[in-house]
Structure formats: C-alpha cells, structure tokens
Amino acid sequence: MPPDALRNPTLATTGTLIALSCKWKRDAEFLTDDEDRLTGRATLEAITRVAGGLKSLGVGNGDVVAFLCGSSVRHAVGFFAAQWIGAVPSALHVRETADRLVSTTQWLEAKILFFDDAFAAVAQQVRATCGAAVTLIALQDDPGDLADRRWLDLAAADPTPMAAVRPEDPAVIILSSGTTGAPKGVVHLHRTLCAAARNCQAIYGPTEPEDSTLVCMAPSFAAWVIICLPHMATRARIHFDRGFEPARFLETLARERITMAPLVPTMWRMVIAANPEGHDLSRVQCAMFSGEPGSPDLVAAMASRICGHVRTAYMSAEVCSGSAVAAGPATLIAAAKPSSTGKPVPGADIRIVDPDGGLDDVLPDGEPGEIVVTSPSIASHYWKDEALTRQKLVGGWWRSGDLGYLDGDGDLFVIGRTDNVINTGGIKVHAEEIEAALSQHPAVAMAGVVGAPDPTWGQRIEAHVVLGDTSATESDITVFLEAEGLLPRNKLPKRIVIREDLPTGPTGKLYRRGLLAPDD
C-alpha cells in the first residue's frame, strides 16, 4: 500500500473506503471470478497499479472512464482504479446497439474505453468514430492489434498514491434507460457513494467479512454498485460471473460457498425451476430479490427451496443503498406481506405525495401516490440534463415517478409508475395491476399492459402476453380473470395479443411503449 494511502481516513471518498477495506481484509480473498482471485492486499496493489497506468495515459480528476464488458475482477479493479485518481467510471449497457454505444461514449466524453473480447467489434466502431480522443484498453491478455493498451500493461505500471479527491467530486455515472430508450446519466459523488456503502446490514441482513456474495449482472446495472459497495465496505468477498444462466448460478452458489444471493424476481423464478435441490446451498444465508415487488408464490419458493432468510429492497440508481426501503422474513413471511418492500433503512426517509403536487402534499396511509425519497446517498444530478435534475431532484428529495402506498404499519407497497396509468372512460387503471392478475394464469409466462388509443374510451386496456402453454386462447385468459375474481369487468383487457416475446430496453426491463402500434 502506498505510504500516504490513508493520510486522511475520515475523508468520505471511495478511495479511502477501498484502502481501509483492503487493509483489513489482508490475505483473505476479496475479489474473485473464474480467472482471477485477489486477496485484500493484492486487490489494493492491483488498483494502485492500474490507477498508475491510467495516470500515465493522462487520465485525471473528472475524466470519464467507460467500460463495455461483463462483470469480472478486472472490471472491478478498473472501476475502483479510476476513482482512486479522481476519474469517473461509467459502464455502458451491453445490450445496446453498436451505434447507440458509440454515441453514448461520445456523449459521456469518455477518455478511456475498457472492453472485453465479447465487445471488440463495438470497440473498433468507437475507434473509427472517435479516433484518438478515446484510448481503447482490452481487459483480455492478448487482444492483438484491437486495443491501444492491454490490461497487463496497466497492471504492470508503478503504483500511484490516492489522488486528493474531495467528497463533493463526481464518483460515478450510472446509465439508466429512460422511456425513450435514450440514456440518462445518474451522477453520484464520493460522499453519496460512501453513504450508500454504510447500509449493508440493514439491507442484506447480518454480514461479516467471512461472508460472500455473487454478482452476475452486467456492470451497467445500478445493482452492481448497490451490491458491490456495501459488501466492499463490510469486507465480504465478492465473486463475479460474466453473465446469468440458472444452472450455472446454482453451481456457483455451491462451489463458491456463497452466503448472500441477489437476483431480480424473474431470474429467481428461473433458478427455482432449475432444480436447486440438486445443489449444496447450505452456506446461503440470505436470498435477496429487488427490482419489482414479490409475490406469495415467489417468496414461499425462495424460503423453502433456497434459504429461509428471504429479503427484498426498493432501491434505484438515483438513491442507491443509503436510501433503501428494505424488508426481511418478519415482514415478507411472518407478517404475510410478500409484496411489501418494508420500511426505510436508518438515515433514509420516504413520503407518499400527490403526483401532481409538491413535496408537502403528503397523502394518508392507504392512499396511493408518488414515492419520494431522501437520504445522504441521493444522487447529485443528471449528466448534462439540468431540466431533469430540477424535475426529479428537489430539495434533497428524489421524485421517483413510482406509485405506492403505506399500510397501517408503515410498510411500503410499490404498485406501479405514474406514467403507466391508463385512463379508460375516466377510470384510472395501473398497468402493473393488470399484469399481476394476468401472471396468475397458469399459461401466461410474461405479460405487458398498455393503454392503446380508443375513440370511445379514450384509452383501452390492451394486454400482450407470452404463453408457456400455447394452447391457451384470449378467451381462456379473460374467463380466468373474471372467474377467479382477479379483476372487475371494467378492468378486464379489451384486447389480448399473444406474442412470442415482449420488447425490453437495454436494462432488460419491459419497454411498454414498444407494445403500441406505430400510429398509436
């Protein structure tokens, strides 16, 4: 470790957090994947050397360092190395088109682009468009002539001391897909990331340095930061996988003796269908889901087939883990609230307000409204978007655009989006409510609901479904919804379209606008 790496251990920067965690992790494994296994000491040495390599390329305070890759030890080292010298990392969405990735790199004004072999062709398009303005660095050992520098070149550089970074300096740009598909850049400061890192135990349950977590989502997802930083601060081992496949996920849980397993509900359903009983999951102490509300069948299956300690949390790129609303078995199972996300973690606060009103227009318990959140981990601003910053980040609060309500116990229930409300004949219907009812039909694998223009009703409820059992018909589904009492007649879809798949955005979430006809 450089002798002055901890010259100010009270400074709220990610560099200090990293240095302290690596110092006390010592010779125990800290960052691992199928190719690299680094101890605490080796992690800090790798970060300071790669930081030195970046510095030799002219990278400094405020420069953007972009990544186009899967999750790996090398990506994590590069991410933290950029922050070590005051640069700002940003991971590109790997599911985007090549043209969009090139334009996003330009929009970020990235000085460096790290890439792995799966995205070498896109990196070459960046080179053709941006020229020498962007230095290409290959994460693989032998990229041939596809890169300006190799990972091994940076890893062999002389270590560099931590830069004089301030808590108010930008620390990361998290790319979040908007409703048009264009990216929005959520900018966090070192101060807000350090605040986010302090809530590991409140979100994921009792966590110690001997614990471990498995990260298989792409680095572009906010979940990468939300999971990695708190576990980094707690000094738990982080194991990376470049992608998700249900059987491999279970194999990795068993082989790596993982104690905290996080996924979104859709992925958990795939894992549960992949025979978890065929693997030794005795070390799993927490099965975590987030990204969408739970359901009785999901929570029950996770508790009985993965581990009894099931947890969930409501978080986002804008608020990170310092603003989380979290729930564990006491809420999800004992209190029989599997679709709740619980209560705010220490230091955070939430309100339910009138979506058309201000922050003080607070609604009573039980009445749905817009969820607004505050805590020390709220993002600073949106990259190059002052208008969106003024609209969403107001007086230290984040206006989420999510709809929810508090029950009598103060537990939060997320029920939809303010922009997913269908106004049909003067009645306001939440698309997510209809989707949840459709998903209970045994033949429906996926569902998306939109409000399509209608000359009589203004908007009609239109459902698009993917079937697991292709023998089911539109009539079968409609009869089921009514017979089971899942929806009143005025909320039944006026049209059900059976499709092979549903459109998604670069983050993998349902892209509802893609369900509308071009003229709608």
Image: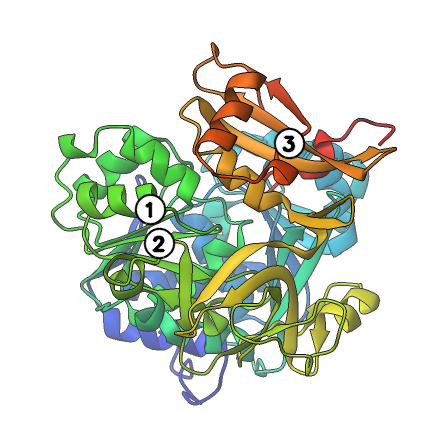
Q: Which residue shows up at 54% across the image and 39% down it?
A: 487
What distance separates the C-alpha of mark 2 from that of mark 1?
A: 5 Å
Query: Percent position (x, y) of residue 337?
Result: 35, 58
Is label 3 or label 2 in front?
Answer: 3
**The image quarter in which residue 461 lies:** top right
**The image quarter in which residue 389 lies:** bottom right
Quickly name the residue at label 1: 296
Picture layout, residue 237 above or below residue 345: above
Picture layout, residue 293 above or below residue 192: above
Q: Using the rendered image of the protein, determine whether residue 149 is visible from the camera's viewpoint.
A: no
Secondary element type, mark 2: loop
Q: Is residue 506 left or right of residue 227?
A: right
Query: 389 or 242: nearer the eye?
Result: 389
Q: Which residue shows up at 55% across the image and 32% down it?
A: 447
Is label 1 or label 3 in front?
Answer: 3
Q: Which mark is residue 338?
A: 2
Query: Percent position (x, y) of residue 402?
Result: 61, 59
Dot 2, crowdedness within 10 Å: few (<14), some or many (≥20)?
many
Q: Which mark is residue 493?
A: 3
Q: Are marks 2 and 1 in contact (CB under 8 Å)?
A: yes
Q: Is residue 23 left or right of residue 502?
A: left
Q: Residue farthest to the top?
A: 471
Query: Percent position (x, y) of residue 363?
Result: 61, 75
Query: 293 or 181: nearer the eye?
Result: 293
Q: Amino acid at mark 3?
A: Pro
Q: Using the rendered image of the protein, determine whether residue 341 is visible from the camera's viewpoint.
A: yes
Q: Which mark is residue 384?
A: none
